[in-house]
Amino acid sequence: MRAVVVALGKIGLPLAVQIARSGHEVIGCDINPEVVELVNEAQPPFPGEAGLEEALAEVIASGALRAQLDTTAAVAGGPDLVVTVPPLAVDDDAKPDWGALDAAIAAIGAGLQPGTTVAVETTLPVGTTRQRISPALASASGLSAEQDFFTLFSPERVYSGRIFADLAEYPKLVGGLSDAGEARGVELYRSFLTAEVWPMGSAEAAEMVKLAETTYRDINIAFANELARFADREEIDVARVIEAANSQPFSHIHNPGIAVGGHCIPVYPRFYLEGDPAAALPAAARAVNDAMPTYAAERLEKALGGLQGARVLVLGAAYRGGVKETAFSGVFGVTTALEALGASALVSDPLYSDSELADLGLTPWDGESIDAAIVQADHAEYAQLSAADLPGVRVVLDGRGIIDADAFAAAGITLERIGRPSTTPPAS
Protein backbone atom coordinates (compact mmCIF):
# COMPACT_ATOMS: atom_id res chain seq x y z
CA MET A 1 0.00 0.00 0.00
CA ARG A 2 1.04 3.59 -0.65
CA ALA A 3 -0.36 6.13 1.78
CA VAL A 4 -0.33 9.86 2.42
CA VAL A 5 -0.97 11.24 5.92
CA VAL A 6 -1.91 14.92 6.06
CA ALA A 7 -0.98 16.87 9.24
CA LEU A 8 1.94 15.47 11.26
CA GLY A 9 0.80 16.47 14.70
CA LYS A 10 0.32 14.43 17.85
CA ILE A 11 -2.14 12.10 16.09
CA GLY A 12 -0.97 12.21 12.48
CA LEU A 13 2.73 11.52 12.94
CA PRO A 14 2.31 8.37 15.09
CA LEU A 15 -0.29 7.15 12.60
CA ALA A 16 2.09 7.73 9.67
CA VAL A 17 4.79 5.83 11.55
CA GLN A 18 2.35 3.00 12.32
CA ILE A 19 1.49 2.61 8.63
CA ALA A 20 5.15 2.79 7.57
CA ARG A 21 6.42 0.22 10.03
CA SER A 22 3.70 -2.16 8.87
CA GLY A 23 5.51 -2.44 5.56
CA HIS A 24 3.89 0.35 3.54
CA GLU A 25 5.25 3.42 1.76
CA VAL A 26 4.14 6.66 3.42
CA ILE A 27 4.46 10.34 2.63
CA GLY A 28 3.64 12.62 5.55
CA CYS A 29 2.55 16.16 4.74
CA ASP A 30 2.47 19.24 6.92
CA ILE A 31 2.27 22.98 6.23
CA ASN A 32 4.93 23.72 8.88
CA PRO A 33 8.47 23.60 7.37
CA GLU A 34 10.03 23.02 10.79
CA VAL A 35 7.86 19.95 11.39
CA VAL A 36 8.75 18.53 7.96
CA GLU A 37 12.46 19.12 8.57
CA LEU A 38 12.40 17.50 12.01
CA VAL A 39 10.49 14.45 10.78
CA ASN A 40 12.94 13.92 7.92
CA GLU A 41 15.75 14.15 10.48
CA ALA A 42 13.96 11.46 12.53
CA GLN A 43 13.32 13.93 15.36
CA PRO A 44 9.82 14.00 16.89
CA PRO A 45 8.53 17.59 16.75
CA PHE A 46 6.78 17.19 20.11
CA PRO A 47 7.69 15.37 23.34
CA GLY A 48 5.98 12.71 25.39
CA GLU A 49 4.77 10.08 22.90
CA ALA A 50 5.89 6.64 24.08
CA GLY A 51 7.91 4.76 21.46
CA LEU A 52 7.71 7.47 18.81
CA GLU A 53 11.39 8.47 18.76
CA GLU A 54 12.60 4.93 18.17
CA ALA A 55 9.90 4.02 15.65
CA LEU A 56 10.37 7.26 13.71
CA ALA A 57 14.11 6.67 13.46
CA GLU A 58 13.43 3.18 12.12
CA VAL A 59 11.02 4.18 9.34
CA ILE A 60 13.02 7.23 8.27
CA ALA A 61 16.18 5.15 8.05
CA SER A 62 14.45 2.47 5.98
CA GLY A 63 12.88 5.03 3.64
CA ALA A 64 9.37 3.85 4.45
CA LEU A 65 8.38 7.35 5.60
CA ARG A 66 9.34 10.77 4.32
CA ALA A 67 7.81 14.17 4.91
CA GLN A 68 7.08 17.06 2.58
CA LEU A 69 5.18 20.35 2.45
CA ASP A 70 3.25 19.82 -0.79
CA THR A 71 0.12 17.79 -0.05
CA THR A 72 -1.28 18.14 -3.56
CA ALA A 73 1.87 16.71 -5.12
CA ALA A 74 1.88 13.78 -2.71
CA VAL A 75 -1.76 12.95 -3.46
CA ALA A 76 -1.21 13.38 -7.22
CA GLY A 77 1.06 10.33 -7.03
CA GLY A 78 -2.07 8.22 -6.73
CA PRO A 79 -1.75 6.61 -3.28
CA ASP A 80 -4.16 3.90 -2.22
CA LEU A 81 -5.04 5.75 0.98
CA VAL A 82 -5.00 9.37 2.11
CA VAL A 83 -5.62 9.96 5.81
CA THR A 84 -6.26 13.52 6.93
CA VAL A 85 -6.12 14.40 10.62
CA PRO A 86 -5.82 18.19 11.08
CA PRO A 87 -7.87 19.12 14.16
CA LEU A 88 -11.02 21.11 13.52
CA ALA A 89 -10.21 24.46 15.06
CA VAL A 90 -12.81 26.01 17.35
CA ASP A 91 -13.38 29.42 18.86
CA ASP A 92 -13.69 30.20 22.56
CA ASP A 93 -17.25 28.87 22.51
CA ALA A 94 -16.16 25.64 20.78
CA LYS A 95 -17.86 26.64 17.51
CA PRO A 96 -16.13 25.09 14.48
CA ASP A 97 -13.69 27.14 12.44
CA TRP A 98 -13.49 25.23 9.17
CA GLY A 99 -10.53 27.10 7.68
CA ALA A 100 -7.71 24.63 8.36
CA LEU A 101 -9.73 21.51 7.54
CA ASP A 102 -11.18 23.04 4.37
CA ALA A 103 -7.67 24.01 3.26
CA ALA A 104 -6.41 20.46 3.81
CA ILE A 105 -9.35 18.99 1.89
CA ALA A 106 -8.82 21.48 -0.97
CA ALA A 107 -5.15 20.51 -1.19
CA ILE A 108 -6.07 16.82 -1.27
CA GLY A 109 -8.79 17.37 -3.85
CA ALA A 110 -6.45 19.31 -6.15
CA GLY A 111 -4.27 16.21 -6.53
CA LEU A 112 -6.85 13.45 -6.10
CA GLN A 113 -6.63 10.57 -8.58
CA PRO A 114 -9.10 7.82 -9.47
CA GLY A 115 -8.81 4.79 -7.21
CA THR A 116 -7.73 6.65 -4.06
CA THR A 117 -9.61 6.33 -0.77
CA VAL A 118 -9.68 9.40 1.49
CA ALA A 119 -10.20 8.76 5.20
CA VAL A 120 -10.99 11.62 7.57
CA GLU A 121 -10.02 11.04 11.21
CA THR A 122 -10.69 14.59 12.46
CA THR A 123 -13.66 14.59 14.85
CA LEU A 124 -16.65 16.19 13.14
CA PRO A 125 -20.32 17.02 13.68
CA VAL A 126 -22.55 14.25 12.36
CA GLY A 127 -23.12 14.52 8.60
CA THR A 128 -19.96 16.49 7.79
CA THR A 129 -18.23 13.75 5.77
CA ARG A 130 -21.19 13.31 3.42
CA GLN A 131 -22.38 16.89 3.25
CA ARG A 132 -19.10 18.84 3.29
CA ILE A 133 -15.97 16.71 2.80
CA SER A 134 -16.96 14.46 -0.10
CA PRO A 135 -18.56 17.24 -2.20
CA ALA A 136 -15.47 19.42 -1.66
CA LEU A 137 -13.18 16.61 -2.85
CA ALA A 138 -15.35 16.01 -5.91
CA SER A 139 -15.45 19.71 -6.75
CA ALA A 140 -11.69 20.21 -6.40
CA SER A 141 -10.77 17.07 -8.33
CA GLY A 142 -13.47 16.93 -10.99
CA LEU A 143 -13.98 13.25 -10.09
CA SER A 144 -17.20 11.42 -9.22
CA ALA A 145 -17.63 10.66 -5.52
CA GLU A 146 -18.04 6.97 -4.65
CA GLN A 147 -17.28 6.04 -8.26
CA ASP A 148 -13.81 7.45 -9.00
CA PHE A 149 -12.80 7.77 -5.34
CA PHE A 150 -14.12 6.83 -1.89
CA THR A 151 -14.50 8.99 1.22
CA LEU A 152 -14.59 7.50 4.72
CA PHE A 153 -14.84 8.65 8.29
CA SER A 154 -12.73 6.79 10.86
CA PRO A 155 -12.53 8.48 14.28
CA GLU A 156 -9.20 8.58 16.06
CA ARG A 157 -9.65 6.81 19.39
CA VAL A 158 -6.23 7.25 20.95
CA TYR A 159 -4.74 9.12 23.88
CA SER A 160 -1.64 11.31 23.62
CA GLY A 161 1.33 9.57 25.18
CA ARG A 162 0.14 6.03 24.45
CA ILE A 163 -0.99 6.16 20.81
CA PHE A 164 0.78 3.01 19.59
CA ALA A 165 -0.68 0.97 22.46
CA ASP A 166 -4.17 2.34 21.80
CA LEU A 167 -3.92 1.62 18.06
CA ALA A 168 -3.15 -1.99 18.93
CA GLU A 169 -5.98 -2.34 21.44
CA TYR A 170 -9.11 -0.39 20.53
CA PRO A 171 -11.30 -1.44 17.60
CA LYS A 172 -10.83 0.81 14.58
CA LEU A 173 -14.17 2.10 13.31
CA VAL A 174 -14.73 2.74 9.61
CA GLY A 175 -17.83 4.38 8.15
CA GLY A 176 -18.28 4.88 4.42
CA LEU A 177 -20.58 6.75 2.09
CA SER A 178 -21.24 3.55 0.13
CA ASP A 179 -20.96 -0.19 0.75
CA ALA A 180 -18.05 -0.48 -1.68
CA GLY A 181 -16.21 2.46 -0.11
CA GLU A 182 -16.62 1.12 3.41
CA ALA A 183 -15.40 -2.33 2.39
CA ARG A 184 -12.31 -0.79 0.77
CA GLY A 185 -11.64 1.26 3.90
CA VAL A 186 -11.84 -1.81 6.14
CA GLU A 187 -9.40 -3.62 3.85
CA LEU A 188 -6.89 -0.75 3.92
CA TYR A 189 -6.99 -0.22 7.69
CA ARG A 190 -6.58 -3.94 8.33
CA SER A 191 -3.32 -3.83 6.39
CA PHE A 192 -1.58 -1.83 9.13
CA LEU A 193 -3.54 -2.50 12.34
CA THR A 194 -3.60 -5.60 14.53
CA ALA A 195 -6.69 -4.38 16.39
CA GLU A 196 -10.12 -5.30 15.06
CA VAL A 197 -11.51 -3.07 12.31
CA TRP A 198 -15.27 -2.61 12.53
CA PRO A 199 -17.44 -1.47 9.61
CA MET A 200 -20.05 0.95 10.96
CA GLY A 201 -22.55 0.97 8.10
CA SER A 202 -22.29 4.70 7.41
CA ALA A 203 -20.02 7.65 7.92
CA GLU A 204 -22.69 9.22 10.11
CA ALA A 205 -22.62 6.28 12.53
CA ALA A 206 -18.82 6.49 12.78
CA GLU A 207 -18.98 10.26 13.34
CA MET A 208 -21.55 9.79 16.09
CA VAL A 209 -19.44 7.21 17.95
CA LYS A 210 -16.69 9.69 18.76
CA LEU A 211 -19.19 12.30 19.87
CA ALA A 212 -20.97 9.70 22.02
CA GLU A 213 -17.72 8.59 23.69
CA THR A 214 -16.57 12.06 24.64
CA THR A 215 -20.00 13.42 25.55
CA TYR A 216 -20.53 10.45 27.88
CA ARG A 217 -17.31 11.32 29.67
CA ASP A 218 -18.29 14.98 29.98
CA ILE A 219 -21.68 14.04 31.43
CA ASN A 220 -20.09 11.53 33.81
CA ILE A 221 -17.54 14.07 35.06
CA ALA A 222 -20.30 16.64 35.52
CA PHE A 223 -22.22 14.19 37.70
CA ALA A 224 -19.06 13.55 39.74
CA ASN A 225 -18.60 17.30 40.14
CA GLU A 226 -22.18 17.74 41.33
CA LEU A 227 -21.68 14.91 43.83
CA ALA A 228 -18.50 16.63 45.02
CA ARG A 229 -20.19 19.99 45.53
CA PHE A 230 -22.99 18.34 47.50
CA ALA A 231 -20.41 16.42 49.52
CA ASP A 232 -18.66 19.69 50.35
CA ARG A 233 -21.88 21.09 51.77
CA GLU A 234 -22.54 17.95 53.81
CA GLU A 235 -18.89 17.39 54.84
CA ILE A 236 -18.79 13.94 53.21
CA ASP A 237 -15.73 12.44 51.53
CA VAL A 238 -16.92 11.99 47.94
CA ALA A 239 -13.86 9.89 47.05
CA ARG A 240 -15.03 7.19 49.47
CA VAL A 241 -18.56 7.47 48.10
CA ILE A 242 -17.42 7.04 44.49
CA GLU A 243 -15.09 4.16 45.35
CA ALA A 244 -17.91 2.37 47.14
CA ALA A 245 -20.44 3.02 44.37
CA ASN A 246 -18.01 1.73 41.75
CA SER A 247 -17.44 -1.50 43.69
CA GLN A 248 -20.47 -2.98 41.95
CA PRO A 249 -20.30 -3.53 38.17
CA PHE A 250 -23.01 -1.13 37.03
CA SER A 251 -21.47 2.08 38.38
CA HIS A 252 -18.57 3.80 36.59
CA ILE A 253 -18.52 7.26 38.15
CA HIS A 254 -15.48 9.35 37.17
CA ASN A 255 -13.53 11.60 39.52
CA PRO A 256 -14.43 15.24 40.17
CA GLY A 257 -11.93 17.96 39.45
CA ILE A 258 -11.21 21.63 39.04
CA ALA A 259 -11.63 21.71 35.24
CA VAL A 260 -12.22 19.68 32.09
CA GLY A 261 -9.74 20.63 29.38
CA GLY A 262 -8.16 19.47 26.15
CA HIS A 263 -9.18 19.28 22.50
CA CYS A 264 -11.83 16.61 23.08
CA ILE A 265 -14.08 16.54 26.14
CA PRO A 266 -14.91 20.28 26.37
CA VAL A 267 -15.34 20.53 22.58
CA TYR A 268 -17.06 17.46 21.15
CA PRO A 269 -20.25 17.76 23.22
CA ARG A 270 -20.66 21.10 21.42
CA PHE A 271 -20.29 19.26 18.11
CA TYR A 272 -22.97 16.81 19.24
CA LEU A 273 -25.25 19.72 20.10
CA GLU A 274 -24.72 21.14 16.60
CA GLY A 275 -26.77 18.23 15.30
CA ASP A 276 -29.05 17.72 18.31
CA PRO A 277 -29.59 21.17 19.84
CA ALA A 278 -32.50 19.97 21.99
CA ALA A 279 -30.34 17.46 23.88
CA ALA A 280 -30.59 18.43 27.55
CA LEU A 281 -27.85 16.39 29.23
CA PRO A 282 -24.85 17.48 27.12
CA ALA A 283 -25.75 21.15 27.55
CA ALA A 284 -26.27 20.77 31.31
CA ALA A 285 -22.98 18.89 31.73
CA ARG A 286 -21.05 21.59 29.89
CA ALA A 287 -22.54 24.23 32.19
CA VAL A 288 -21.60 22.25 35.31
CA ASN A 289 -18.04 21.58 34.20
CA ASP A 290 -17.47 25.13 32.94
CA ALA A 291 -18.39 26.41 36.42
CA MET A 292 -15.78 24.37 38.32
CA PRO A 293 -12.82 26.81 38.08
CA THR A 294 -14.98 29.55 39.63
CA TYR A 295 -16.21 27.15 42.29
CA ALA A 296 -12.60 26.30 43.20
CA ALA A 297 -11.63 29.96 43.46
CA GLU A 298 -14.62 30.65 45.71
CA ARG A 299 -13.66 27.70 47.92
CA LEU A 300 -10.18 29.16 48.27
CA GLU A 301 -11.58 32.60 49.04
CA LYS A 302 -13.66 31.18 51.89
CA ALA A 303 -10.76 29.17 53.31
CA LEU A 304 -8.35 32.10 53.18
CA GLY A 305 -10.86 34.60 54.51
CA GLY A 306 -10.81 36.71 51.36
CA LEU A 307 -8.67 37.04 48.24
CA GLN A 308 -8.48 40.80 47.86
CA GLY A 309 -4.81 41.61 47.33
CA ALA A 310 -3.71 37.98 47.84
CA ARG A 311 -0.95 36.39 45.75
CA VAL A 312 -2.22 33.01 44.55
CA LEU A 313 -0.06 30.54 42.68
CA VAL A 314 -1.79 28.32 40.12
CA LEU A 315 0.19 25.13 39.69
CA GLY A 316 -0.14 23.87 36.14
CA ALA A 317 -0.89 25.61 32.87
CA ALA A 318 -1.36 22.35 30.95
CA TYR A 319 -4.85 20.91 30.75
CA ARG A 320 -3.63 17.59 32.19
CA GLY A 321 -0.51 16.18 33.75
CA GLY A 322 2.50 15.33 31.62
CA VAL A 323 1.12 16.86 28.41
CA LYS A 324 2.39 20.19 27.10
CA GLU A 325 -0.95 21.43 25.81
CA THR A 326 -3.23 24.22 27.03
CA ALA A 327 -6.31 23.74 24.82
CA PHE A 328 -9.30 24.73 26.99
CA SER A 329 -7.07 24.33 30.05
CA GLY A 330 -8.58 25.14 33.41
CA VAL A 331 -5.72 27.57 34.04
CA PHE A 332 -7.56 30.27 32.12
CA GLY A 333 -10.83 29.91 34.02
CA VAL A 334 -9.03 29.65 37.36
CA THR A 335 -6.87 32.75 36.87
CA THR A 336 -9.85 34.74 35.59
CA ALA A 337 -11.94 33.73 38.61
CA LEU A 338 -9.12 34.55 41.05
CA GLU A 339 -8.58 37.98 39.55
CA ALA A 340 -12.32 38.68 39.65
CA LEU A 341 -12.16 38.05 43.40
CA GLY A 342 -9.29 40.53 43.81
CA ALA A 343 -6.28 38.18 43.80
CA SER A 344 -3.08 38.37 41.80
CA ALA A 345 -2.94 35.08 39.88
CA LEU A 346 0.54 33.70 39.23
CA VAL A 347 1.28 30.53 37.25
CA SER A 348 4.00 27.90 37.30
CA ASP A 349 4.32 24.71 35.22
CA PRO A 350 7.30 22.35 34.89
CA LEU A 351 6.62 21.99 31.14
CA TYR A 352 6.54 25.73 30.36
CA SER A 353 9.16 28.46 30.54
CA ASP A 354 8.30 31.89 31.90
CA SER A 355 8.29 33.33 28.39
CA GLU A 356 5.92 30.61 27.18
CA LEU A 357 3.56 31.33 30.05
CA ALA A 358 3.67 35.04 29.28
CA ASP A 359 2.89 34.29 25.61
CA LEU A 360 -0.26 32.52 26.84
CA GLY A 361 -1.33 35.68 28.65
CA LEU A 362 -0.42 34.26 32.07
CA THR A 363 1.76 35.84 34.75
CA PRO A 364 4.76 33.63 35.62
CA TRP A 365 5.51 33.13 39.30
CA ASP A 366 8.59 35.02 40.44
CA GLY A 367 9.33 32.54 43.23
CA GLU A 368 8.49 35.07 45.92
CA SER A 369 6.14 34.54 48.88
CA ILE A 370 2.52 33.63 48.17
CA ASP A 371 -0.63 33.49 50.26
CA ALA A 372 -2.27 30.47 48.66
CA ALA A 373 -1.93 27.95 45.85
CA ILE A 374 -4.26 25.96 43.60
CA VAL A 375 -3.23 22.69 41.95
CA GLN A 376 -4.77 22.89 38.48
CA ALA A 377 -2.89 20.12 36.58
CA ASP A 378 -2.00 16.67 37.88
CA HIS A 379 1.68 16.75 36.91
CA ALA A 380 3.60 13.89 38.52
CA GLU A 381 5.97 16.44 40.07
CA TYR A 382 3.17 17.79 42.25
CA ALA A 383 2.78 14.46 44.06
CA GLN A 384 6.14 15.28 45.69
CA LEU A 385 5.23 18.87 46.48
CA SER A 386 6.11 20.09 49.99
CA ALA A 387 5.43 23.21 51.99
CA ALA A 388 9.03 24.28 51.40
CA ASP A 389 8.25 24.59 47.68
CA LEU A 390 5.56 27.21 48.39
CA PRO A 391 7.06 30.00 50.53
CA GLY A 392 4.54 31.81 52.68
CA VAL A 393 1.57 29.68 51.66
CA ARG A 394 -1.28 29.39 54.18
CA VAL A 395 -3.92 27.50 52.18
CA VAL A 396 -3.61 25.07 49.26
CA LEU A 397 -6.57 23.95 47.19
CA ASP A 398 -5.77 20.65 45.49
CA GLY A 399 -8.01 20.57 42.44
CA ARG A 400 -6.73 17.17 41.29
CA GLY A 401 -6.35 15.16 44.49
CA ILE A 402 -2.66 14.59 43.90
CA ILE A 403 -0.68 16.14 46.78
CA ASP A 404 0.15 14.67 50.19
CA ALA A 405 -2.54 16.00 52.54
CA ASP A 406 -0.88 14.80 55.75
CA ALA A 407 2.44 16.45 54.89
CA PHE A 408 0.80 19.84 54.40
CA ALA A 409 -1.27 19.54 57.56
CA ALA A 410 1.87 18.66 59.51
CA ALA A 411 3.50 21.81 58.11
CA GLY A 412 0.62 23.93 59.45
CA ILE A 413 -1.04 24.54 56.07
CA THR A 414 -4.75 24.13 55.42
CA LEU A 415 -5.52 21.86 52.49
CA GLU A 416 -8.80 22.15 50.61
CA ARG A 417 -9.92 19.39 48.24
CA ILE A 418 -12.97 19.32 45.98
CA GLY A 419 -15.57 17.00 47.45
CA ARG A 420 -13.50 16.10 50.50
CA PRO A 421 -13.30 17.55 54.00
CA SER A 422 -10.62 20.17 54.63
CA THR A 423 -7.36 19.04 56.18
CA THR A 424 -6.49 21.60 58.81
CA PRO A 425 -3.24 21.95 60.73
CA PRO A 426 -3.18 20.62 64.29
CA ALA A 427 -4.07 23.11 66.99
CA SER A 428 -1.04 24.75 68.61
Image (cartoon, grey):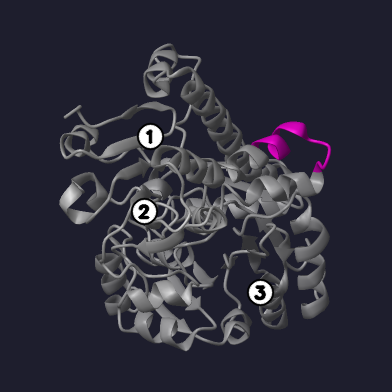
Q: Secondary structure at mark 1?
A: strand
Farthest top residue?
248
Residue name at image x 65 percent, y 42 percent:
286
Q: Label 2, on which residue?
A: 164
Along the horizontal axis of the image, is 14 left or right of 56? right
Q: Is residue 114 above or below residue 183?
A: below
Q: Label 1, on which residue?
A: 417
Q: Give the magenta range.
A: 276-285
Q: CA distance from mark 2 to mark 3?
A: 26 Å
Residue 77 in the image: state x and y as whole percent. Answer: 58, 82
Earlier along the polypeptide chain: callout 3 or callout 1?
A: 3
Q: Amino acid at mark 2?
A: Phe
Q: Label 3, on which residue?
A: 100
> Which quarter of the figure has residue 123?
bottom right
Answer few, some or many: residues within 10 Å of disc 1's Cα (few below 14, many 20 plus, some between 14 and 19). many
Q: Secondary structure at mark 2?
A: helix
Q: CA distance from mark 1 to mark 2?
A: 35 Å
Residue name at image x 36 percent, y 53 percent:
164
Query: Does the magenta stretch mainly form a helix, a strand or a loop?
Result: helix
Q: Is residue 314 above or below residue 228?
A: below
**Residue 199 appears in the rendering:** no
